[in-house]
Image (tube, rainbow, N blue to C red):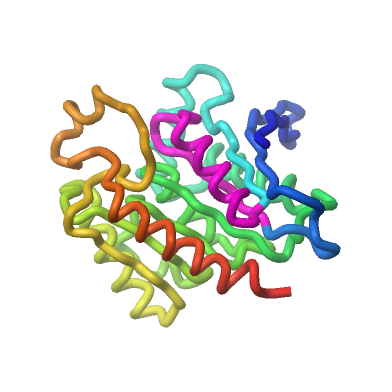
Amino acid sequence: MRQHVGIPLPDGSTLAATLALPEGTAPAAGWPGMVVVHEIYGVEPDMLNVVDLCAENGYAAVLPDLYSHGTRIGCLARAMHQLATGKPGRPAADIDATRRWLADRDDVDGGRLGVIGFCMGGGFALAYAASEPPGVRAASVNYGAVPRDQEELRSVCPVVGSYGGRDLGFRSHGTRLREHMRALGIDHDVEVYPTAGHSFMTDGHHPIAKLALFPLRHGLVRPAADDAWQRTFAFFDEHLANHE
């Protein structure tokens, strides 16, 4: 069951977030944890569904609202600036605060954490995972931006990634991510699905985006989504759930 939570930040403010826990009693060591990083559209129903899906698969999952500081436009501008410059900013600090809050819970094993992101959040998840955050053992990057310089990812944990071959904006990032991981010798599973476009893994209803972002071939593609989710949780299970 989802619940709204507040994550305390160093400046005394509170970050709004949504938490979902697996059913039943937590194991003695605690559940493995997952930080979910939302798309550019923010905390929409499809992102909340991701939190539920993580919980159903045995992960204590939390979705921070990166747009909960000030105006949505201002938060989005800061997020885009961080992605463009590659320099840590408010979004990275919020993700780290979320990771620390989740790791400190009595029902979570802070040494078995993952991060998963989509679109804008995919780029953030990858960059954050490369900063060597404590306890983060695997990252899922879905149609997210990948830096050109592979050295920026040298310290990243194992990565699973999914991209759409019809996504003219980001399909090259999927190929780049696979090449970087191979060159760096980092465990990975990166797939580019020929029939899929952008945001193909979640059932989001963004009619304006489908028109305005036509080159991305935006929208759910169920067969590719089902396979991508199967791969994603298999990867997380290998690196998180099955390790004590």
x and y, in percent, of residue 38 in the image: 47, 39
Q: Specify the segment rendered in magenta.
A: 33-59
Q: Is residue 95 left or right of residue 74?
A: right
- Front position in the image: 131 or 244: 244
- Residue under the point 30% across and 48% down: 222
- Front position in the image: 123 or 56: 56
Q: Is residue 97 above or below residue 17?
A: below
Q: Quadrant of the C terminus?
A: bottom right
Q: Is residue 222 above or below residue 46?
A: below
Q: Is residue 134 left or right of residue 233?
A: right
Q: Is residue 54 magenta?
A: yes
x and y, in percent, of residue 99 in the image: 67, 50
x and y, in percent, of residue 45 in the image: 47, 30
- Residue under the point 26% across and 39% down: 219
Q: Is residue 211 above or below residue 147?
A: above
Q: Residue furthest front?
A: 24
Residue 31 quadrant: bottom right
Residue 177 quadrant: bottom left
- Residue under the point 16% across and 50% down: 166
x and y, in percent, of residue 67 in the image: 52, 27
Q: How many marks?
A: 0
Q: Is residue 138 left or right of residue 135?
A: left
Residue 176 quadrant: bottom left
- Residue under the point 45% across and 77% down: 186
Q: Is residue 69 magenta?
A: no
Q: Is residue 119 left or right of residue 242?
A: left
Q: Quadrant of the N terminus?
A: top right
Q: Is residue 58 above or below residue 81?
A: below
